[in-house]
Image: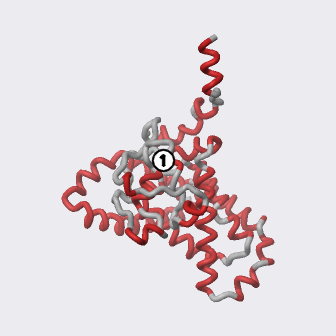
Amino acid sequence: MEIFYEPLRSTLNLLLLAGFFFGSLALLVKRTGLLDAMIRTRKEFTTNLSLALINLVLLAPLLALPSGAIRETLGMGALFAPFWESLPAPLTVLAAFLLYDFVVYWRHRFEHSPLLWRIHATHHADTALSWLSVQRKHPLSKLLSVCVDISLLLLLGLPEWSIGLAGLVIAFWGFFVHCDVPWTLGIFGKVLLSPAAHRLHHIRDEELMGTNYGNTLTLWDKMFGSYCDPTPYLNCETGIAEGTRNLGGELLRPFEKRYWTRRKDPAAEETEAAA
Protein backbone atom coordinates (compact mmCIF):
# COMPACT_ATOMS: atom_id res chain seq x y z
CA MET A 1 0.00 0.00 0.00
CA GLU A 2 2.97 2.31 0.46
CA ILE A 3 3.34 2.72 -3.30
CA PHE A 4 -0.02 4.51 -3.34
CA TYR A 5 0.75 6.85 -0.44
CA GLU A 6 2.75 9.47 -2.34
CA PRO A 7 0.39 9.58 -5.37
CA LEU A 8 -2.58 9.88 -2.97
CA ARG A 9 -0.95 12.71 -1.03
CA SER A 10 -0.01 14.59 -4.20
CA THR A 11 -3.45 14.09 -5.72
CA LEU A 12 -5.29 15.26 -2.60
CA ASN A 13 -3.08 18.35 -2.40
CA LEU A 14 -3.73 19.10 -6.07
CA LEU A 15 -7.49 18.66 -5.77
CA LEU A 16 -7.71 20.64 -2.53
CA LEU A 17 -5.74 23.56 -3.93
CA ALA A 18 -7.60 23.53 -7.24
CA GLY A 19 -10.92 23.07 -5.46
CA PHE A 20 -10.27 26.00 -3.15
CA PHE A 21 -9.17 28.32 -5.94
CA PHE A 22 -11.79 27.45 -8.52
CA GLY A 23 -14.48 26.97 -5.87
CA SER A 24 -13.80 30.52 -4.69
CA LEU A 25 -13.96 31.69 -8.29
CA ALA A 26 -17.32 29.95 -8.73
CA LEU A 27 -18.64 31.60 -5.57
CA LEU A 28 -17.60 35.06 -6.82
CA VAL A 29 -19.14 34.50 -10.25
CA LYS A 30 -22.29 32.51 -9.48
CA ARG A 31 -23.05 33.73 -5.94
CA THR A 32 -26.63 32.72 -5.17
CA GLY A 33 -26.66 30.41 -8.19
CA LEU A 34 -23.74 28.36 -6.87
CA LEU A 35 -25.91 25.84 -5.03
CA ASP A 36 -27.99 25.15 -8.14
CA ALA A 37 -24.79 24.72 -10.15
CA MET A 38 -23.42 22.25 -7.58
CA ILE A 39 -26.62 20.21 -7.67
CA ARG A 40 -26.61 20.20 -11.49
CA THR A 41 -23.00 18.97 -11.68
CA ARG A 42 -23.11 16.60 -8.68
CA LYS A 43 -23.36 13.27 -10.54
CA GLU A 44 -20.79 14.10 -13.20
CA PHE A 45 -18.52 15.72 -10.63
CA THR A 46 -18.56 12.45 -8.68
CA THR A 47 -17.65 10.48 -11.81
CA ASN A 48 -14.86 12.94 -12.62
CA LEU A 49 -13.48 12.74 -9.09
CA SER A 50 -13.53 8.94 -9.23
CA LEU A 51 -11.68 8.92 -12.57
CA ALA A 52 -9.12 11.37 -11.18
CA LEU A 53 -8.45 9.12 -8.19
CA ILE A 54 -8.14 6.03 -10.40
CA ASN A 55 -5.80 7.74 -12.88
CA LEU A 56 -3.69 9.71 -10.42
CA VAL A 57 -3.55 7.26 -7.50
CA LEU A 58 -4.43 3.66 -8.34
CA LEU A 59 -2.74 3.68 -11.75
CA ALA A 60 0.16 5.93 -10.75
CA PRO A 61 2.64 3.06 -10.22
CA LEU A 62 1.73 1.60 -13.63
CA LEU A 63 1.91 4.97 -15.37
CA ALA A 64 5.34 5.55 -13.85
CA LEU A 65 6.69 2.57 -15.80
CA PRO A 66 6.16 3.97 -19.33
CA SER A 67 7.19 7.40 -18.08
CA GLY A 68 10.47 6.01 -16.76
CA ALA A 69 11.00 3.91 -19.88
CA ILE A 70 10.58 7.01 -22.04
CA ARG A 71 13.23 8.81 -20.02
CA GLU A 72 15.65 5.90 -20.46
CA THR A 73 14.89 5.37 -24.16
CA LEU A 74 15.21 9.05 -24.94
CA GLY A 75 18.47 9.39 -23.08
CA MET A 76 19.93 10.70 -26.34
CA GLY A 77 18.44 14.02 -25.26
CA ALA A 78 21.68 14.51 -23.33
CA LEU A 79 23.23 15.58 -26.64
CA PHE A 80 21.15 18.76 -26.53
CA ALA A 81 21.55 19.41 -22.80
CA PRO A 82 24.57 21.78 -23.19
CA PHE A 83 22.51 24.01 -25.45
CA TRP A 84 19.75 24.46 -22.87
CA GLU A 85 22.30 24.98 -20.11
CA SER A 86 23.79 27.84 -22.12
CA LEU A 87 20.47 29.70 -22.26
CA PRO A 88 19.05 31.94 -19.53
CA ALA A 89 16.56 30.02 -17.38
CA PRO A 90 13.52 32.10 -18.50
CA LEU A 91 14.21 31.26 -22.16
CA THR A 92 14.53 27.57 -21.33
CA VAL A 93 11.17 27.61 -19.51
CA LEU A 94 9.56 29.51 -22.40
CA ALA A 95 10.87 26.94 -24.89
CA ALA A 96 9.62 24.09 -22.70
CA PHE A 97 6.21 25.71 -22.41
CA LEU A 98 5.82 26.33 -26.16
CA LEU A 99 6.93 22.81 -27.06
CA TYR A 100 4.78 21.24 -24.33
CA ASP A 101 1.70 23.17 -25.46
CA PHE A 102 2.43 22.28 -29.09
CA VAL A 103 2.63 18.54 -28.31
CA VAL A 104 -0.56 18.66 -26.23
CA TYR A 105 -2.37 20.35 -29.12
CA TRP A 106 -1.46 17.60 -31.60
CA ARG A 107 -2.02 14.75 -29.16
CA HIS A 108 -5.47 16.19 -28.41
CA ARG A 109 -6.22 16.67 -32.09
CA PHE A 110 -5.28 13.06 -32.88
CA GLU A 111 -7.56 11.91 -30.05
CA HIS A 112 -10.45 13.14 -32.18
CA SER A 113 -9.51 10.74 -34.97
CA PRO A 114 -11.71 7.61 -35.41
CA LEU A 115 -8.95 5.43 -33.98
CA LEU A 116 -8.54 7.32 -30.70
CA TRP A 117 -11.99 8.86 -30.22
CA ARG A 118 -13.13 5.71 -28.38
CA ILE A 119 -10.78 6.55 -25.48
CA HIS A 120 -11.30 10.32 -25.69
CA ALA A 121 -15.12 10.33 -25.80
CA THR A 122 -15.25 10.00 -22.00
CA HIS A 123 -13.71 13.45 -21.68
CA HIS A 124 -16.44 14.97 -23.86
CA ALA A 125 -19.35 13.26 -22.12
CA ASP A 126 -19.77 15.97 -19.47
CA THR A 127 -23.02 17.87 -19.95
CA ALA A 128 -22.25 20.23 -17.06
CA LEU A 129 -18.65 21.46 -17.30
CA SER A 130 -16.76 22.26 -14.12
CA TRP A 131 -13.11 22.76 -13.20
CA LEU A 132 -12.84 19.02 -12.48
CA SER A 133 -13.94 18.13 -16.04
CA VAL A 134 -10.28 18.34 -17.04
CA GLN A 135 -9.75 15.14 -15.02
CA ARG A 136 -12.56 13.27 -16.78
CA LYS A 137 -10.23 10.95 -18.70
CA HIS A 138 -10.41 7.26 -19.43
CA PRO A 139 -7.33 5.47 -18.03
CA LEU A 140 -6.26 4.59 -21.59
CA SER A 141 -6.41 8.27 -22.51
CA LYS A 142 -4.38 9.12 -19.42
CA LEU A 143 -1.79 6.52 -20.40
CA LEU A 144 -1.57 8.04 -23.88
CA SER A 145 -0.95 11.51 -22.50
CA VAL A 146 1.74 10.20 -20.11
CA CYS A 147 3.55 8.51 -22.98
CA VAL A 148 3.22 11.32 -25.52
CA ASP A 149 3.12 14.73 -23.86
CA ILE A 150 6.69 15.00 -22.62
CA SER A 151 8.43 12.61 -25.02
CA LEU A 152 9.51 15.31 -27.48
CA LEU A 153 10.72 17.54 -24.65
CA LEU A 154 12.85 14.74 -23.23
CA LEU A 155 14.11 13.87 -26.71
CA LEU A 156 15.28 17.45 -27.09
CA GLY A 157 17.08 17.26 -23.76
CA LEU A 158 15.11 19.96 -21.97
CA PRO A 159 15.88 19.91 -18.24
CA GLU A 160 13.16 18.28 -16.19
CA TRP A 161 12.79 21.34 -13.95
CA SER A 162 11.76 23.42 -16.98
CA ILE A 163 9.32 20.72 -18.10
CA GLY A 164 7.87 20.68 -14.59
CA LEU A 165 7.34 24.45 -14.52
CA ALA A 166 5.77 24.43 -17.98
CA GLY A 167 3.56 21.55 -16.90
CA LEU A 168 2.29 23.51 -13.89
CA VAL A 169 1.17 26.40 -16.13
CA ILE A 170 -0.49 24.04 -18.60
CA ALA A 171 -2.19 22.06 -15.81
CA PHE A 172 -3.55 25.22 -14.17
CA TRP A 173 -4.88 26.51 -17.49
CA GLY A 174 -6.48 23.14 -18.16
CA PHE A 175 -8.49 23.46 -14.95
CA PHE A 176 -9.34 27.08 -15.77
CA VAL A 177 -10.66 26.60 -19.31
CA HIS A 178 -13.05 23.89 -18.13
CA CYS A 179 -14.73 26.25 -15.66
CA ASP A 180 -18.39 27.00 -16.27
CA VAL A 181 -17.92 30.69 -17.10
CA PRO A 182 -18.72 32.41 -20.43
CA TRP A 183 -15.45 34.36 -20.48
CA THR A 184 -13.78 35.13 -23.78
CA LEU A 185 -10.96 37.04 -21.99
CA GLY A 186 -11.35 40.04 -24.30
CA ILE A 187 -8.15 41.01 -26.11
CA PHE A 188 -6.23 38.39 -24.11
CA GLY A 189 -8.47 35.74 -25.66
CA LYS A 190 -6.75 36.38 -28.97
CA VAL A 191 -3.60 34.81 -27.51
CA LEU A 192 -4.79 32.68 -24.61
CA LEU A 193 -7.45 29.99 -24.96
CA SER A 194 -10.48 31.14 -22.99
CA PRO A 195 -13.08 29.11 -21.07
CA ALA A 196 -15.61 30.14 -23.74
CA ALA A 197 -13.34 28.89 -26.53
CA HIS A 198 -12.80 25.56 -24.81
CA ARG A 199 -16.49 25.19 -24.01
CA LEU A 200 -17.09 25.50 -27.75
CA HIS A 201 -14.72 22.56 -28.18
CA HIS A 202 -17.03 20.57 -25.87
CA ILE A 203 -20.20 21.63 -27.74
CA ARG A 204 -22.69 18.90 -28.57
CA ASP A 205 -22.05 19.34 -32.27
CA GLU A 206 -19.55 17.06 -33.98
CA GLU A 207 -18.48 19.66 -36.53
CA LEU A 208 -17.80 22.45 -34.04
CA MET A 209 -16.25 19.92 -31.67
CA GLY A 210 -13.41 19.76 -34.19
CA THR A 211 -12.15 23.22 -33.27
CA ASN A 212 -10.10 24.84 -30.47
CA TYR A 213 -7.92 21.86 -29.59
CA GLY A 214 -5.35 23.99 -27.78
CA ASN A 215 -4.77 23.88 -24.04
CA THR A 216 -3.28 27.29 -23.29
CA LEU A 217 -2.51 29.24 -26.47
CA THR A 218 -4.69 29.98 -29.48
CA LEU A 219 -1.50 30.02 -31.59
CA TRP A 220 -1.61 26.39 -32.71
CA ASP A 221 -5.31 26.43 -33.59
CA LYS A 222 -4.83 29.58 -35.64
CA MET A 223 -1.68 28.24 -37.27
CA PHE A 224 -3.26 24.93 -38.27
CA GLY A 225 -6.75 26.17 -39.14
CA SER A 226 -8.75 24.78 -36.21
CA TYR A 227 -9.59 27.98 -34.33
CA CYS A 228 -13.21 29.13 -34.02
CA ASP A 229 -14.39 32.35 -32.39
CA PRO A 230 -16.54 31.32 -29.40
CA THR A 231 -18.50 34.58 -29.17
CA PRO A 232 -21.61 33.30 -31.04
CA TYR A 233 -21.67 30.12 -28.93
CA LEU A 234 -21.47 31.34 -25.34
CA ASN A 235 -23.06 28.93 -22.83
CA CYS A 236 -23.57 26.33 -25.57
CA GLU A 237 -24.83 22.86 -24.67
CA THR A 238 -22.04 20.35 -24.10
CA GLY A 239 -21.79 16.56 -24.26
CA ILE A 240 -21.92 13.81 -26.87
CA ALA A 241 -24.74 11.94 -28.58
CA GLU A 242 -24.07 8.78 -26.57
CA GLY A 243 -24.71 10.68 -23.36
CA THR A 244 -22.95 10.92 -20.01
CA ARG A 245 -22.48 7.86 -17.79
CA ASN A 246 -21.43 6.83 -14.33
CA LEU A 247 -17.95 5.56 -13.53
CA GLY A 248 -18.54 1.98 -14.69
CA GLY A 249 -20.14 3.11 -17.92
CA GLU A 250 -17.23 5.42 -18.74
CA LEU A 251 -14.63 2.76 -18.01
CA LEU A 252 -16.40 0.35 -20.38
CA ARG A 253 -17.17 2.91 -23.10
CA PRO A 254 -14.10 2.29 -25.34
CA PHE A 255 -14.82 -1.43 -25.52
CA GLU A 256 -18.34 -1.14 -26.92
CA LYS A 257 -18.87 -2.94 -30.22
CA ARG A 258 -19.98 0.17 -32.10
CA TYR A 259 -16.53 1.74 -31.68
CA TRP A 260 -14.89 -1.31 -33.24
CA THR A 261 -17.35 -1.90 -36.09
CA ARG A 262 -16.28 -0.27 -39.32
CA ARG A 263 -18.97 2.06 -40.61
CA LYS A 264 -20.14 1.58 -44.16
CA ASP A 265 -19.84 4.35 -46.68
CA PRO A 266 -23.20 6.21 -46.84
CA ALA A 267 -23.26 5.88 -50.66
CA ALA A 268 -22.80 2.09 -50.34
CA GLU A 269 -25.63 1.91 -47.80
CA GLU A 270 -27.96 3.77 -50.20
CA THR A 271 -27.02 1.37 -53.03
CA GLU A 272 -27.77 -1.65 -50.84
CA ALA A 273 -31.11 -0.17 -49.80
CA ALA A 274 -32.09 0.49 -53.43
CA ALA A 275 -31.21 -3.08 -54.39
Q: Residue 152 vs residue 224: left or right? A: right
The residue lying toward the viewer, choosing from 187 and 106, is 187
- The residue wearing badge 1 is 208
Q: Is residue 250 above or below residue 84?
A: above
Residue 270 visible here = yes
Name the residue located 34 percent from the left edge and 59 percent from the top edge. Answer: 182
List x then y, in percent, for residue 271: 64, 17
Residue 57 visible here = no
* SS of the residue under disc 1: helix
Q: Image quarter for residue 101?
A: bottom right
Q: Residue 185 vs residue 92: left or right? A: left
Q: Is residue 83 above or below residue 179?
A: below
List x then y, in percent, for residue 59: 58, 54
Instruction: Locate the C terminus and report the quarter of the image it occupies.
Output: top right
The residue lying toward the viewer, choosing from 204 and 128, is 204
Q: Disc 1 marks which amino acid? A: Leu
Name the residue located 48 percent from the left edge and 63 percent from the top edge. Answer: 174
Instruction: Locate the N terminus and report the quarter of the image it occupies.
Output: bottom right
